[in-house]
Amino acid sequence: MRVTVAKALGTCFGVQDAIDLALDEAYRGELTVIGQLVHNPQTVERLRQNGVQIVDQIDSQDIRTRNVMITAHGAPESLRHRAEDKGFRVIDASCPLVLRVHKAVAELVRGGFHPVVIGQAEHVEVKGIVGDLKDYTVIRDESEIHKLKGRPKIGIVCQTTQQIDFVSRLVDLIRSTYPASQVEFRDTVCKPTKDRQVAVRELAREVDLMVVIGGYNSSNTKKLKLVCDELGVKAFHVERASQLTPEMFHGHEHVGITAGTSTPHEVIEEVYYAILNMPGVDKEACSGLPEREKNLY
Ligand code: SF4
């Protein structure tokens, strides 16, 4: 059996920079993170062990520190002002690629378009995008397109971790359902997400088993598993190396490894070496781990 690691996988630079900043700040003084910094149990545990407090919202009575952090997923401007009004020092770890979505929405609104976000309404990133808008629509899938009836100008962006194929199909459907409306679309799926989607598709065509690593609450990890399911490749979604057993690999010749944008590289390494130590692995034929992604923005 041989093992190949996807060309792009694991923690994106946006989340990694935010984690590094949180650990740095926690080292200098106390810090509370507003909302989930990353959907991964090991990273959340590591932050907690380093004294970082995590709360759901800025109005929480549990905040005991002066420093509060906005996560990589961003937040509405009003949240920052509310935090400052309460006397907090705000540390902003918003990813530049999330801020690009905020900017795109502001431009569409200035152009007279009704802002539409393709994504999950309950996700912190989407809440940050629409939080200061008076009138907007969030669309999860085709069943919600009816919400756009009667809108003459529709301006669409998407959550950065959406699948671009899915988003493009939805935009086409909106255009064909409302031919009289002017529809403007800004592709705001981020590059690290696209790179991971392309890499998993490429690798899934080569292997007969895929191991997808990431938190069970990470939506982009689940989407990577979904890609394998769509391509008919058997895939296991695991959170940690201890979940692997030799039986999982029995009868397979070529195993692929991928991981969501919230999965720490340390966890990927653990899983990679655990698979390499399974019986019957030809280590000489296995790929190494790719270089970690850097922030180029
Ligand atoms: S998934 Fe993309 S937009 Fe979100 S934090 Fe990572 S790089 Fe930034």
Image (cartoon, helix red, strand yellow):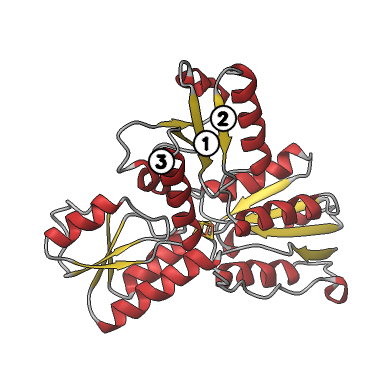
Residue type at the position of mark 3: Arg
Residue 247: give x, y in percent of width and height: 73, 54
Nearer-the-camera pick, 34 or 4: 34
Within 10 Å of disc 2 (Cα), the crowding (few <14, some 14-19, many 20+) is: some
If you read the primary sequence from the N terminus, does the residue marked by circle 1 or circle 3 appear first? 3
Question: Where is mark 3, residue-wise?
Answer: 110
Question: Where is mark 2, residue-wise?
Answer: 183
If you read the primary sequence from the N terminus, does the residue marked by circle 3 or circle 2 appear first? 3
For disc 3, does the CB lie below 8 Å from ligand 1?
Answer: no
Say what secondary structure mark 2 lies in: strand
- Compared across the picture, whether 250 is left or right of 169 comes to right
If you read the primary sequence from the N terminus, does the residue marked by circle 2 or circle 1 appear first? 1
Say what secondary structure mark 3 lies in: helix
Q: Which mark is residue 156?
A: 1
Residue 242 placement: quadrant: bottom right
Residue 258: give x, y in percent of width and height: 68, 58
Residue 153: give x, y in percent of width and height: 49, 27
Residue type at the position of mark 1: Ile
